[in-house]
Amino acid sequence: MPKKENLIKIAIDSPAAAGAGTLAKTISKYYNLLYLDTGKIYRLIAFIKINQKKKFNKKFLRKKIQKLNLKSLQNKNLLSDEVGNEASLIAKDKYIRKLVYSFQIQCAYKPPKKFNGSCLDGRDITYKIIPDADLKFFITANLKTRARRRYLELKNLKKNVSYSEILKSIKNRDKIDYNRRISPLKKTEDSILINTSKLSKRACFLKIKKIIDSKINS
Ligand code: C5P
């Protein structure tokens, strides 16, 4: 690994349920990087909006975001499909994106000293949050595979969901995330494409590990 002063920064963008989160977590653990799932920030705001509708305004939200920390993103309620759908709607808001920008920058560029660097995943990480990342990945999988994975994940959490409902909402989220005007999901030219449709978690990790190792040892 590079010396402490040469923090390694990994940026990942991906559509919903492509396996980026699992992969990013594994990479972060292996290389001792601070991991931030930026989707959870938008999910937290969506959760607040759903549950505190009456109080939800700019000032209220600003105060909540000032108190944002990694622990507050671990709430299991953030994983529901309802929250995911609302997250993709509120994520179109310029004011909200601006509010959450500095938290992401702090995690990416100033992770606590115990880490060798950072790894962030989301929709605009490779070109807006960490444009100078050492490694950039665009992780994707075909729609049906993503829907099946998300369905099983939610079933495991004992959520009452149907496959067709999940397929529909992932399709809808793709449409919103790829086509919005502000910070759309896209693969940048300098990102490495990883299609996880036919790969096991282990195979994905090994593929990415090989790329990272060759970069940090070069
Ligand atoms: O990654 P996840 O599915 O949890 O993200 C929920 C929603 O948050 C996405 O559909 C997307 O609209 C939004 N998001 C975003 N920018 C990010 C991460 C997530 O707009 N960096």
Image (cartoon, grey):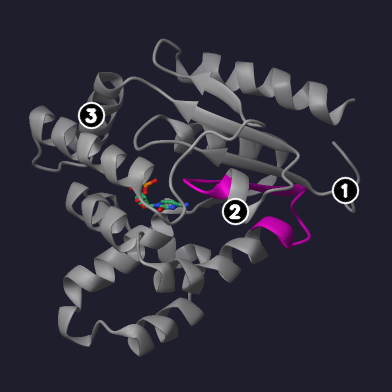
Q: Residues within 10 Å of mark 1 (few under 14, many from 20)?
A: few
Which residue is tagged 2? 128
Please indicate, yes or no, whether residue 156 appears anywhere in the rendered image: no
Residue at 78% over, 24% down: 213
Q: Are marks 1 and 2 in contact (CB under 8 Å)?
A: no
Image quarter where the N terminus lies is: top right
Q: Position of residue 18 (x, y in %)?
A: 39, 29
Which residue is tagged 3? 152
CA gap between label 2 and label 3 equals 32 Å
Front-most of residues 74 and 98: 98
CA gap between label 1 and label 2 equals 21 Å
Q: Position of residue 47 (x, y in %)?
A: 26, 65
Identify the mark nearer the N-term, 2 or 3.
2
Q: Which segment is the magenta one?
A: 108-125
Which residue is tagged 1? 6
Q: Are marks 3 and 1 in contact (CB under 8 Å)?
A: no
Residue at 50% over, 81% down: 66
